[in-house]
Image: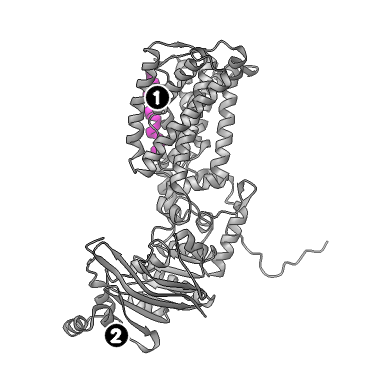
Amino acid sequence: MTTMTVPGAPRVDKDADPGVLRKALGAHEFGVLAATVAIFLYGTFFVNNFLTGDNLLSVVQQITFIGIIGTGMTLLIVAGEIDLSVGSQYGFLSVLMAYSVTQWQLPILVSALLVMALGVVTGAIYGVITAVFKVPSFVVTLAGLAILRGFALLVTDGQPLQGSTNSAYHSLVGGNAIGSLAAQTVWMVAVMAAFGWILSRTKFGYDVYATGGNMKAALNAGIRAVRVKILCFCITGALCGLASVILVGWLGSANPLTGNGVELSVIAAVVVGGASLTGGVGSVTGTLLGALVAGLIGNLLVLIGVDGNWQQVATGALILAAVLVNRFIATRQAAMR
Amino acid sequence: MRVLEVADIRRRFGGVEALRGVSLGIDEGEVVGLMGDNGAGKSTLMKVLCGSVRPDSGTMTLDGKPLSLRSPRDAAAHGIAVVYQDLALVDQRDVATNVFLGREPRRGLVVDRRLMRREARTVLDELSIRIPSVRLPVGGLSGGQRQCIAIARAVHQGGRIVLLDEPTAALGPEQQANVLKLIKTLKERGTAVIVVSHNVDHVLAVADRVVVMRAGLVQGVRDVHSTSAADVVGLILGSVAADAISHGHGGPATAVASGLEVETRGAR
């Protein structure tokens, strides 16, 4: 065998992929990934009945609505904005879904599209007020939170509404897909996969990051940043609508108090997942892990038999821990350069 | 060859006449230093050149053809790119993404990241800009590297006329040298460069001509080979003030020029 001679020294590729491990260690999602793995391992070794298919599937099912709405919130937070009204929107649109099917007797598909379209319109209104009239989204959506909850209560007189009894609708969104894998889990995975791909791979996703990272630079580079922000609000509204459609189909009724406080769990999932509230940083994968880690902690506390109220405390502690870990990663990254 | 020429440009903001009939031309491969105290009209002229301000009157010609710019986007389409300090980069994104910001290459629906990284590296190599890896977020790079990346983007996105706004301000000496070197590289490639700066030494080091503005007019144009820092500072300040200062302190001309930045634009 003869050895091949390479002319000149082999050129080192400076831009080579740094490898999976180094990438993971430097990623904004590292903290939440480590927490998820640690909690999962703890449950596996120390808690009975944790590592069963049914239990894990139920955890994933419980985070469905946080996951779907959180996907929109991820786009919005990466774009440098926030929507505090997602819980109210989810509640109002659930009520509207039930109302549309029972009172107006509209077909389910029409009702579903109507509800999602109304979510888009709500998002567009927030987006225009925020991006065009320069009112901070925090304030605009805080107003939206109150207004939409009010509407939800007005429409129903504060009483839960009966929804559809259509069995096809129920099984499409509330039944089991395969075995004990819930249909709503499949919906969540589909939504997160689609928007995860859009955010990380497409031109629109790149525009979202640029808009949230440095709006002036984005505008200077010819990115229509105002439109990007409005679109992110619209997507969040549409996903609140989708979550409502799934919920009403699953439960067969709609409570005007649906989604009370959900905005906090959703924002927690996004922030625990490594997103920065100042914009430009975050990912759908991170949000999924953020929702998952909160779900796992809740599940473990129940299995261990701890008072349910501790779950709130644990969620709060989780947010603090995650933010501190992200802070630590950011400073370490700066030091490594 | 003359690429861009503006003649008798006037622009008024309310009661303030920011430009009172300014004419300026630049050739291919030429570096023009645009100087003047604050309020002299440099920024307004730059904004006219990059399409973000429309002049009240005056003509612009590009390659001998009349030009009218409706927006910065329009200017960019004509090959006129402006690089603002700190308004150009997205810190959280990597070098390759920043070089392509707003114009990411696509393969189908997906941004072609491999192509983007490869081409970004080629552009940086061509311009002799040293960056360890195009995967690094630009937020962690030095001021000089960031400035160079911003300029690289302007060039890569087809800028034949590059406007640089204070490219060396707030940089360390070594970083400043790198940016000045890059401006020379651009000149060798035939790019026309207009540098707005308060630093006389830097302008004299890279420019072919210095255009000094005062009170909305071109006060004087000097060939760098036949002028001195004191001469340029004299133009910037007006001869009387310059005499008083150079006799009074006798300090370096640059310190005088940058030390006297008085905000005079009350209307802005």
Q: Is residue B88 left or right of residue B232?
A: right
Q: Which mark is residue B226?
A: none
Residue A250 % position (x, y): 54, 15
Q: Is residue A106 left or right of residue B82?
A: right
| Chain bearing mark 1 | A
Q: Is residue A4 left or right of residue B255?
A: right
The answer to whether residue B208 is above or below residue B62 is below
| Chain bearing mark 2 | B
Q: Which residue is mark 1?
A: A88
Residue sitting nearer the eye, A74 or A41: A74
The answer to whether residue A213 is above or below residue A295 is below
Q: Quick check: is A321 in the magenta stretch?
A: yes
Residue B148 % position (x, y): 46, 65
Q: Which mark is residue B231?
A: 2
Q: Residue at x 39, y 15 (%)?
A: A307
Q: Residue at x 43, y 14 (%)?
A: A255
Q: Is residue A184 left or right of residue B268?
A: right
How far apart are labels 2 and 1 at the CA level?
Answer: 68 Å
Furthest residue to the right? A1
Q: Secondary structure at mark 1?
A: helix
Q: Residue at x 37, y 17 (%)?
A: A153
Q: Secondary structure at mark 2?
A: helix
Amino acid residing under circle 2: Asp
Residue B103 % position (x, y): 54, 55
Residue B3 in view here: yes
Amino acid residing under circle 1: Ser
Which quarter of the rendered picture does the C terminus of chain A lie within?
bottom left
Label 1 environment density (alpha carbons within 10 Å; few <14, some 14–19, many ≥20) = many
Which quarter of the rendered picture does the N terminus of chain A lie within?
bottom right
Q: Which residues are magenta?
A: A309-324
The answer to whether residue A173 is above or below residue B27 is above
